[in-house]
Image: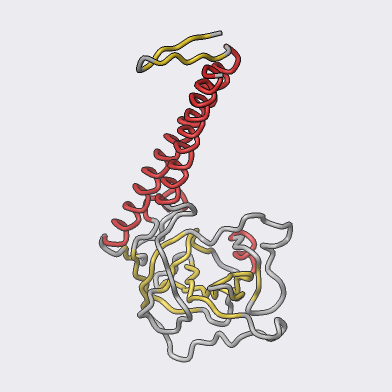
Amino acid sequence: MIKFRLFRMEWRWSPALLVAYLAMMVLLCNLGFWQLRRADEKQALLNAQYAAQMSVALDLNQRIPGEPELEAIRYRKATLQGHYDDAHQLLLDNQVHDGRPGYLVFTPFLPANGQAAVLVNRGWLPLGRDRRVVPDLSIDTPVEQLRGRINRFPDVGIRLAGGGTPGEGWPVRTQYVDLAALGVKFGYALAPFQLELDTDQPAGYLRDWRINVVIPPEKHRAYAVQWFGLALTLSTLMFWNSLRKRRE
């Protein structure tokens, strides 16, 4: 039996129980501090995203950035001159907004200087009553210049085999963006990013672009409080149980 004195009181524990208690305390406290570190990392990421949006807009007609540069320019504002190829458009399926299923509409924009086409995310469209009916995606007024936000393409949890393979006809539907397959379908090179069309730009649909992370810093801090709370509860039970046995 291990004895411990604190505030003129004696606490007694068996060695096995004390070892188990200390191991659980180390685990719970480490989990709590890990969540606090994750909260700091997520906050730094959000701050970087806000700073990117406030920086000077990139002129994509000077150069289309490649994949290695994407993380450094993600969420940057950008401008582009050229024209839409509205005869060849993409519907990204299974996109939910406010609980309603729908599509994200991607239209290639061909730069005036002949660089790789940029897939412009024109926004969200609700799914009609009949999935067989293709929505009208035509652009009535020619657009020669646009402005938007650089971002990665929407990700999916599980990529089912064939889900990124474009089907027949236009507009084409896919479950996720496979640039290699889409490049073959469109017949020209595609930039490795999307341009989320600004809300004040014409020829768009519902655009609710947000700066976010999968788990916000506040939730990480809430998880940390839970882990530290479990550690406190465990300590309270440990000392109360020892005191009860001593009195008995």
Q: Is residue 125 above or below residue 9?
A: below
Side (left or right) of 239 relative to 91: left
Q: Which quarter of the rendered picture does the N terminus lie within?
A: top right
Residue displayed at 73% across by 57% down: 161
Name the residue furthest bottom: 140
Q: Which quarter of the rendered picture does the C terminus lie within?
A: top right
| Residue 53 on image: x %, y % | 31, 61
Residue displayed at 61% across by 65% down: 182
* Most foreground residue, 196 or 107: 196
Q: Is residue 209 above or below residue 223?
A: below
| Residue 234 on image: x %, y % | 51, 30
* Most foreground residue, 65 or 54: 54
| Residue 202 on image: x %, y % | 40, 84
| Residue 203 on image: x %, y % | 45, 84
The quadrant holding residue 143 is bottom left
Total tally of numbered discs in the picture: 0
